[in-house]
Amino acid sequence: MDEKLVEMLAASFAGDLFETIKAARKFRDEKVFRHTMLENEDGMMVFCGLFPKADVAQFPGVNSLYLEQLETFNMMGIITDGQTKLDFFHLGGMNKPLTSLKNPNQLTDLLRREQLISFLQQYFRLRNMLVDLSRCSYEEFLQIAKAEVDAHTSFKEFSTIEKILMQSH
């Protein structure tokens, strides 16, 4: 697996998730937060949930061995159709609330890379983005991402996104 790609995906994911964490700071009494990545007309939903360990214990199919791996506060990648499918990935955690993190780099350091890549692989598949992260190079991924942007972006938005992609090089 291309380490540069893994690090870029982890940093990008952490950057997006950190925005949700910053927003969550306003709600001091709440302990569960969700960063939605995909919600489609078929009812499929992909999100990263921030959950205390006690809440994860309530998920269907969670056993004591799995719970032993968790921290007090956890990032869980969730893929569900809301009825019959529930896949979850322990993406990382810590024993202090995740809202105490000061920047996305701290969040990146907490991410469990293997779980993150498995979660993102399924997310990309649901987005009909044909990429095998285990075999894809950083450069190939950028080409695939650019093709996705080209196919799904209006001309007005294109120049802004192209600038972002070019900064990744």
Image (spheres, helix red, strand yellow):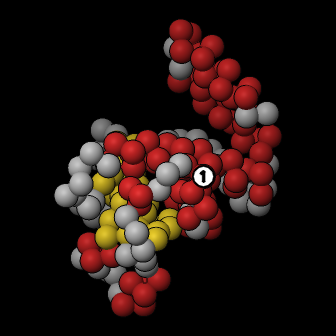
In-image side of 51 versus 155 (left or right): left
Q: Quadrant of residue 120?
A: bottom right
Judge the density around disc 1: few (<14), some (14-19), many (≥20) Cα neighbours within 10 Å.
some
The amino acid sitting under disc 1 is: Asn
Report whether 131 appears left or right of 60: right
Q: Nearer the viewer, residue 37 or 103?
A: 103
Answer with the quarter of the image where residue 73 lies.
bottom left
Q: Which residue sits furthest top?
A: 156
| Image position, residue 10 (x, y; %) | 62, 53
Q: In this figure, which residue is indicated by the disc labeled 1?
A: 105
Write the residue at 26% across / 72% down: 55
Work out whether residue 134 or residue 102 is closer to the camera in this orientation and state it: 102
Q: Give percent across and percent down for residue 59.
A: 28, 74
Q: Position of residue 43 (x, y in %)?
A: 28, 47
Q: Answer yes or no: is residue 121 visible.
A: no
Q: Residue at x 37, y 75 (%)?
A: 72
Secondary-structure class at tag 1: helix
Q: Measuring 65% from the left and 35% from the top, which residue is drawn there? A: 145
The C terminus, quarter of image: top right
User: Do we see residue 169 in this rendering?
Assistant: yes
Q: Is 129 placed above or below 72 here?
A: above
Q: Work out whether 90 lies above or below 104.
A: below
Horizontally, is 51 left or right of 162 in the view?
Answer: left
| Residue lying farthest to the left in this orientation | 29
Total marks drawn?
A: 1
Q: Residue at 80% of width from left, 40% of height from top?
A: 139
Q: Is 82 on the left-hand or right-hand side of 116? A: left
**Depth order, front residue of 1/164:** 164
Q: Quadrant of the N terminus?
A: bottom right
Q: Position of residue 90 (x, y in %)?
A: 47, 69
